[in-house]
Amino acid sequence: MRLEAVEEKFIANKANKHMWYFWGEKDSISGDFKVVGIDKEGKEHPVLLSGNDKVWQFSNASISPNDGADSHIPCRSLQVDYRN
């Protein structure tokens, strides 16, 4: 599987839209989609947004070809500054 996220500026404590692209066999690019923020102490934090709620993952992401990729997931995520 190959993964690519469209480059966007990450602004602390602000929600932003991201597009994630996937290439690979159907079984390797379908299922749950999880993105984790990690602070400098190594603690994990949920960063994906579902409405206004932070979630750990989107379940059962479906295959949806786009822009030459085998699948893609548009989502909103929160860039959090965990340095403080």
Image (spheres, rainbow, N blue to C red):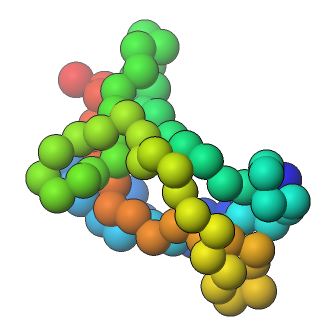
Farthest residue toward the bottom?
67
Residue 58, horizontal then vertical, whole percent: 42, 48
Callout count: 0
Residue 6, horizontal then vertical, whole percent: 57, 71
Residue 61, horizontal then vertical, whole percent: 53, 57
Specify the quadrant that holds the C terminus: top left
Left or right of 32? Residue 67 is right
Q: What residue is drawn where x is 68% and y is 81%?
A: 65
74 to 50, vertically: above or below? below
Q: What residue is drawn where x is 30% and y is 28%?
A: 82
52 to 20, vertically: above or below? above
Q: What residue is drawn where x is 72% and y is 64%?
A: 22
Residue 33 in view in this figure: no
Left or right of 52? Residue 58 is right
Name the image quarter holding residue 76: bottom left
Residue 78, horizontal then vertical, whole percent: 28, 50
Residue 61 in view in this figure: yes
Left or right of 42? Residue 80 is left
Farthest residue toward the left?
52
Q: What residue is drawn where x is 55% and y is 44%?
A: 32
Q: 31 or 80: nearer the eye?
A: 31
35 to 70, vertically: above or below? above
